[in-house]
Image: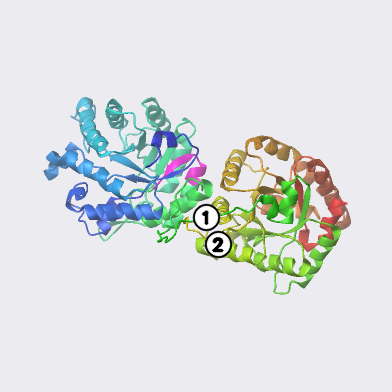
Amino acid sequence: MAQDFREALQEDRVFVFDGAMGTMLYGKGMYINRCYDEINLSAPKVVLEIHQEYIKAGAEILETNTFGANRFKLTPYGLNEQLAEINYKGVKLAREAARAGQWVAGAIGPLGIRLEPWGPTSTDEAKQAFKEQAEALLDGGIDLFIIETFTDLNEIHQAILAVRELCNLPIVAQMTVLEDGNSSFGTSPEVFTRRLEEWGADVIGLNCGVGPQIMLETIERMAHVTKKKLSAQPNAGLPKNVEGRNIYLASPEYIGEYAKRLIQAGVRLVGGCCGTTPEHIKQIVAGARMLSPHKVQPFITVKEVEKKDEQQPVEVVPRELKSEFARKIAQGQFVSSVEITPPRGADPKAVLDSIKMLKEAGVDGVNIPDGPRAQMRMGAAWLALLVKQQVGMEPILHYCCRDRNLLAMQSDLLGMYAAGLRNILIITGDPPKMGLYPDATAVFDVDAIGLTNMATRLNHGMDIGGNPIGQPTGWHIGVGVNPGAIDLDHELRRFEWKVDAGAEYAITQPVFDVEKLVNFMERIKHCRIPVIAGIWPLTSLRNAEFMNNEVPGASVPPPIMERMRKTKTKDEGREEGLAIAREMYLHVKNIVQGVQVSAPFGKVQYALDVFK
């Protein structure tokens, strides 16, 4: 059974609606001149199939096929007497498709007539019509109402009043706007947003009418005048008339990209309207999961498998037994590591020789990044294995979500563990467009939070489908974090989710501003895990500029930039960068439980000099 939706709304998370129903019905051969709401009765299997396709795509909230199921729109088809039956059946079909943890929204659209003072229908008559439909939806057992595609503020007010006279279920109230962001009646988003909030809407939003770009601009205006949660269901772009048919040309990828932008602008309920399909919703889910991953349903389904025997209890590997690096952290010791990038070619000799220097110097571990900045290099896992076998030093393997799907990631984690690797740092990964091959595709089935959940499941003897794998793994799970993030609140939320998912330690982006690290550590007291501070010894002003402008997550503050700017020669730049790194080390060593020093351009000695 799904969580009470009003209770769920209190959580800071993203909910994903389904997409267009009419578009899908038309695509399945339903003529456009028939009543699409009545298909609930005459062809229920078709409606159910569409709901199921959206569930498979990852939708969490299904809208009933009842958008026009009111007395004014049903009467021309001679269906007014079947109003209650059509709405009731619409709820039951959506409920049949929904799974545990998913919700059904009773869809109510405009009446299709003009209300006073612009038309002959009174507001009382309109409210009564909405009430008839709402009662039938309630009888079916909905979780919330979605009152959508309204242009007349007066009409949507009557719909809200009708629902509120019947119940206190959550209401998502959505207007439709033109390209200037105003309704067709000329009402600005600032005005209708305030009115909908005053009238008791729980979520305020937009749907239909326009594509995602204009909707984003309008949402940004709405966000300034309300603290209510916002929703957005854009069309798949503006329709193009092709041989008498309206064709929506916005690709699923385009809609998915804008879904992320809408979420960043404050939207917490996102879906699709006219022209959108399960493929569009799949991309919206992928985008939403990047920003609210632990709460959004994955669009990859896990089939039930026959389990001949009940899963036997497993003995989880204690943290201190996972690795020497894990033992030291578990015992509260201060740990050190150096980050060394894998070679560009197939010969690891030079890199392995430099790592031997780290071992001789007493460094606890070597961090091996996985395709940093989307550059093609030797596989991090293979280099980590060579380090363990030929150097005898503990590798800390960075592992990103960019290049592998869910199946491959699970297989990798099992195989790497069997080969003897134990320490992992889970990261989402830089997108291919940053690197030398911008046209390369990225997978991103999950992000770092989802992958942390996956590794934690393996550590408890289960795959992502809950199927037993036998002996559990004993990964020492680390995650990345950026104390200097521009949107620190968002970064903190993601950090909390990573801890909830099973993270046991964190390594920060390079720290150049100690005050930001102190502030970050103060704000994670409620979910504190051991933190290892990243330190990057700058080599020159050009290197500082590169870090500040081209390395995601890195930020070099003006005072540091000014110190590097004052250097005149290459040696001066190196010495000043080293001095800054040493200062960072001394400042942070009593705040965190370890440091990770990067070796710029593979210069291991330069990294070791920071410890002196």
**Mark 1–mark 2 CB contact (< 8 Å):** yes
Q: How is the image coloured?
A: rainbow
The residue carrying mark 1 is 446
Regarding residue 604, the answer to whether it shows in the image is yes
In magenta stretch: residue 155 = no
Q: Position of residue 462 (x, y in %)?
A: 52, 56
The CA span between labels 1 and 2 is 10 Å
Q: Nearer the viewer, residue 309 or 354?
A: 309
Placement of 522 over or under 554, stated as above or below: above
In what element is the residue under mark 2? helix
Q: Quadrant of residue 437?
A: bottom right
Q: Residues within 10 Å of mark 2 (few under 14, many from 20)?
A: some
Q: Position of residue 481 (x, y in %)?
A: 65, 47
47 sits to left or right of 5: left
Q: Position of residue 243 (x, y in %)?
A: 26, 61
Regarding residue 436, the answer to whether it shows in the image is no
Q: Residue at x 36, y 26 (%)?
A: 199
On residue 290, the disc is: none
* Marks 1 and 2, the one that precedes in the sequence: 2
Type of amino acid at the residue the image marks with label 1: Val
Q: Residues within 10 Å of mark 1 (few under 14, many from 20)?
A: many
Q: Nearer the viewer, residue 440 or 10?
A: 10
Q: The magenta stretch spans which residues?
A: 261-271
The residue carrying mark 2 is 409
Q: Residue at x 29, y 40 (%)?
A: 107
Placement of 83 over or under 20, stated as above or below: above
Q: How many marks?
A: 2
Type of amino acid at the residue the image marks with label 2: Met
Please tell me whether mark 1 or mark 2 is closer to you in this view.
2
